[in-house]
Image (cartoon, grey):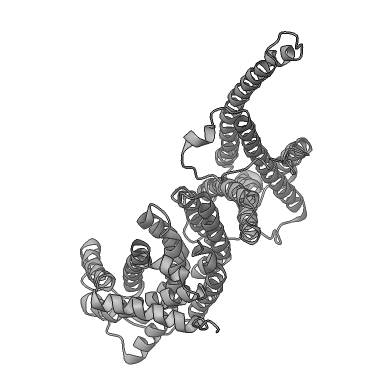
Amino acid sequence: MSAPSPPSTSAAARAVLAKELRLERRAPQTLVAMALFSAMTYVVFHFALRRDTVEGDLASGVLWVTLTLAALLGIGRLFVADRDEGGLEGFLLAPVDRTALLFAKAGALLTFLVALELVAVPLFAVLLLGPTPGPGTWLRLLAVLLLADVGVAVVGTLVAAIAVQTRARDLITSILALPLLLPVVIAAARASAPLLALHGDHALTGRWPAVLGLYDLVFGLLAYALFDFLVED
Amino acid sequence: MSDKLPTNGGYVAAAYLVFLAVLLVYFAIMATRASRLERELSEVNRLVDEAVEGTTADPAAPDAEPVSTGGEA
Amino acid sequence: MPTSRKLYGTRLRVLSILTAVVLTGGFALAAFYAPIEADQGFSQKIFYLHVPLAIVSLCGFIFGGICAIQYLRTNDPRHDLRAYTAIHQSLIFCAAALVTGSIWAKAAWGQWWVWDEPTLVSFLIVFLLYATYQPLRFSIEDPEKQSRYAAVFAIVAGAFVPLNFLAVRLANPLIHPRVLNSSGGSLPGDMKVAFYTCVVGMALLFVTLWKYEMTAKHNRAQLRSLKRKLGGPDAAAIRGRSAAPRVSAS
């Protein structure tokens, strides 16, 4: 009599991802905090900059600072529940590939980021943004956001997996994630600056999505290669 | 030709001084380590002495003598 | 415990003398042989210190990353110690490169910091990233886990360095004359000789200090194991948590 074959990596990843999303749906915690945080950051920016509307470079800077810091909140929470409740041990006992956890967690973080941006970006357009972008500009901005989100999700998962094992978890998350995410911030902010400008053709310079794509690719492969070492024992 | 340019000699000297200072700080760190190593070595030396005296309790063992002096110039 | 298989102190004396000769020679060439640069005058002499420091610290970071890969492959703590020492030392070189770069910026452009010099900005970011290596190690208690996580960090950071340089370089239009050109391609011949001598000297200095550091750590580990064999109080036990890798005497 043979033992039942273990679930495939994708099935395991889907199961863990579903668990993450169900957890967040039943007891919304991270997403609410991220959205509230971004709204408050806009208010802070309004007073700190003494501006009613922003556009161009400034708008892009405000948007990406807010999104990056909000993402840090999500990254900080990513593995905490599993660590505190022993979910990590449970996963390690299961006869599945460890990489499934990477896929699931990166997927969860990506979902959180997209959900956050569904709230935070329209809010930004209402509260602070000077020009009202047309549909074509929105589409280009969406592409930049998605490319950046993939990079943030991958690197964020890696950082979260490292930081959750440390004592000074929150400190390590911030000081580790911010420099690592800097290329994403540079590329995304530069790419979206002309999109949010008051005048001009709202064109997307091709090299910035290319940098984002390269970043996603390199760190995706690295995370795939290295994640096993982070969830041993 | 070069006499028209600002010499800025002070900055060049400052840059090389920074380099020198870093090296000297490193010397200081290594000095503390060396003294700690010395202290531990003398302690090990003392432990060896005690061990030797313990095993050869009779005074007929001449080997114990040179070890116990231990100190170097 | 078997006696040590590898001694880091061998050839250290030859290396030290070689470093002293080459680095002093390089600086002497820079000071007396290389011509005064027409654009910046005498302040360009910082170039012979700043750029070798920068190049060597980058190579040190990459070396640390390679050692970290070796550690993950073999699980041999000596590779972790190598990576730790290399990254630690590169960080100090990197800081020195930043300070000398800042002094150079003041001498050449009148400001202590210029944001449109991509190489300098990239260096700041790399410095900030690697500066988290030590706090990261320090906040993980389990030594084996500490080594493993530090190795993962070292590899990720190693891959980050070129991407970061690319992003920062693209973000800045090139305004300033590129004396910082690290390939040395635009240098006249006699400057090139002095520059390459300085680079080699600085690399030798890095290797010498690295070996010196490894010897010191190895000595301590051997001494500690000797002490333990003699039944003395274990100094390591009371020292508590440490960011440095735990070394065995082998």
Q: Where is residue A186 in the image (x, y as percent from the top left)?
A: 44, 69
Q: Position of residue B52 (x, y in %)?
A: 68, 18
C31 or C131, which lies in front?
A: C131
Q: Which corner quadrant of the image does residue C96 belong to?
A: top right
Q: Is residue C173 visible?
A: no
A161 or C132, which lies in front?
A: A161
Q: Is residue A37 above or below residue C136?
A: below
C119 or C246, which lies in front?
A: C246
As drawn, the residue found furthest toward the bottom would be A135
As drawn, the residue found furthest toward the top would be B59
| Residue appearing at x 46%, y 84% in the figure | A11
Q: Where is residue C114 in the image (x, y as percent from the top left)?
A: 48, 56
On the picture, is C189 further left or further right than A161?
Answer: right
On the picture, is A1 further left or further right than C113?
Answer: right
| Residue appearing at x 76%, y 15% in the figure | B63
Q: Is residue B14 visible?
A: yes
Q: Is residue A140 above or below residue B58?
A: below
| Residue appearing at x 46%, y 51% in the figure | C140
Q: Please state the total of marks drawn on the protein image.
A: 0
Looking at the rendered image, the quarter that the C terminus of chain C falls into is top right
Q: In this view, does A102 lie above or below B56?
A: below
C73 or C157, which lies in front?
A: C73
On the picture, is C140 further left or further right than C223?
Answer: left
Looking at the rendered image, the quarter that the N terminus of chain C falls into is top right
Q: Where is residue A160 in the image (x, y as percent from the top left)?
A: 42, 64
On the picture, is A25 further left or further right than C238?
Answer: left
